[in-house]
Amino acid sequence: MEKPFNLKIKERYLPFIIYLAFLTGFFGSTLAYPRLSYLFLYRIFLGLLFMLIFIDMILNGVEIKKFLNFSSYFLAGWIAYSLLSFLWAQDIKSALRDQVFLTGNILVILIFMYYSNYIKWNILENIILFSYTINVLVGYWEVITDKHLWTSKVSLYNLHRTPSTFFSNPNDFATFLVLYLPFILNFVINKGILAKKVTALIDIILSVPLLILTTSRANYIGFVLVLTVYFLLIEKSEKREYLKYSFAVFLFLIILIGFRLDFGLFSKAGQIISTQLLSLFDFSDSTLSSNVRRELLIVYGLSFLYDYLFFGVGSGNSRALMEKVKQYTINVELHNWFLDVLVCYGIIVFVFYIVWILYIVYKLLQIKCTENKFRLPAISIISSIAAFGFSSISSSKMIEMRIMWFLFALAVFIISNIQKSKGEQKS
């Protein structure tokens, strides 16, 4: 017997559009006609998704109890406070712009929470593997040809053979490689389809040179942190699998270097890494190094926060205020997502944001200790969050980065799915 339309929309159509929005989100404005760059596929599918959700709620009603949790309270409160900050924001245009990004991305998180029973994890992780593979392939195309996709701004920085793929700059691409690496590791150590395992392993090996070429120092640290935390959290049998593949990769690299089959690439990579890591200790005032500029961004950002009595300068207004001191900082973006949240939204939202992240990690650690099918995905997200503190320093406009919000959407999806399963078992 064919299901009625009100059930079809919830069980078939909505999940399908969610998958399409999730997939196209990894490729951003590249999937658009250049003259209409603001209307890319992700936004089209997101608009369609909102329409279907509206129809679903008319036909099936709203299950309020699904929103009765800490994540919903905090996220709704964040949107409300951001709107309230319009009262004292100096630049309403910037405030409105960031409000749109904040509200849209939070709604995506809430959608993953609300429809968690109808979304399948295996499809989501296959989308991640596909997106990661495409990004790696495009990254090598950029390095080999020194060409870039039309949305890349690499040419503006006068950089050559530096990958950015579907992102506007190398730092954002490096952040993507690091934050989604643990999900690719799951395919390698988990028993599954051989083709996926091989693809994932190749992705991991090939992603390392690309990460090095981005010269993203914070993501170098994030990469090491991801691998370390992931290794510490997986079980003994999985650690053996992890070490087995790590040793195979290490042996492969030793053979390449020993027989000089790398054509000196590893030597150059070593020089790039050492140069970037040494630059972490460069606080030269005379040359106004990157570290000094970052220090100035922190100092001026906190001074603006103090001027506003720690209530925040208003959504998106950190940039407007930093314009006044641009001659000292050069950058107007704070280049630190946590600092951006603190300066724009104030101490109250910042504290609750940290508590929310700790709450997510706590819930995921509980899942990690079970034999649930979400155990490895939970470990992946914890590993990504561990690196997120460093990776968020690398990228300048984190509020626009869907990959960050997707990470939290996946976390909330897993937590919500587990809680609903427990509720069904009790009933």
Image: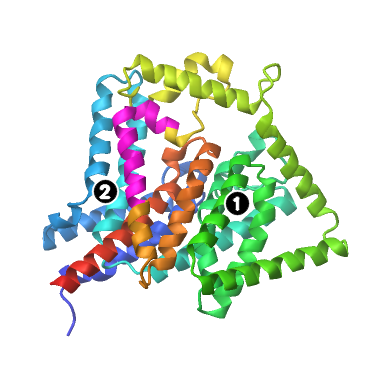
Element carrying mark 1: helix
Question: Does 81 sit above or below residue 322?
Answer: below
> Quadrant location of the C terminus?
bottom left
Residue lying at the far right of the rendered structure: 259
Residue 13 as seen in the image, left or right of residue 296: left
Residue type highlighted by circle 2? Ser
Q: Position of residue 419 (x, y in %)?
A: 24, 63
Tell me if I can see residue 143 in this picture: yes
User: Which mark sits nearer the N-terminus, 1 or 2?
Assistant: 2
- Disc 2 crowd rating (10 Å Cα; few below 14, some 14-19, many 20+) is many
**340 in magenta:** yes
Nearest the viewer among 348 and 369 is 369
Q: Position of residue 341 (x, y in %)?
A: 38, 33
Residue drawn at the location 38% of the way across and 67% of the way down: 374
Task: Tell me the mark number nearer the camera, choosing from 1 and 2.
Answer: 1
> Quadrant location of the N terminus?
bottom left
Residue drawn at the location 55% of the way across and 39% of the way down: 394
- Disc 1 crowd rating (10 Å Cα; few below 14, some 14-19, many 20+) is few
Instruction: Indicate which disc residue 158 carries.
Output: none
Nearest the viewer among 35 and 73 is 73
Question: Does 158 sit above or below residue 235?
Answer: above
Q: Position of residue 410 (x, y in %)?
A: 37, 57
Residue type highlighted by circle 1? Val
The kind of secondary structure the magenta stretch mainly shows is helix
- Residue 197 sits in which quadrant? bottom right
Q: Position of residue 149 (x, y in %)?
A: 60, 48
Nearest the viewer among 125 and 163 is 125
Per the rendered image, the range of residues in magenta is 339-360
Residue tagged 1: 224
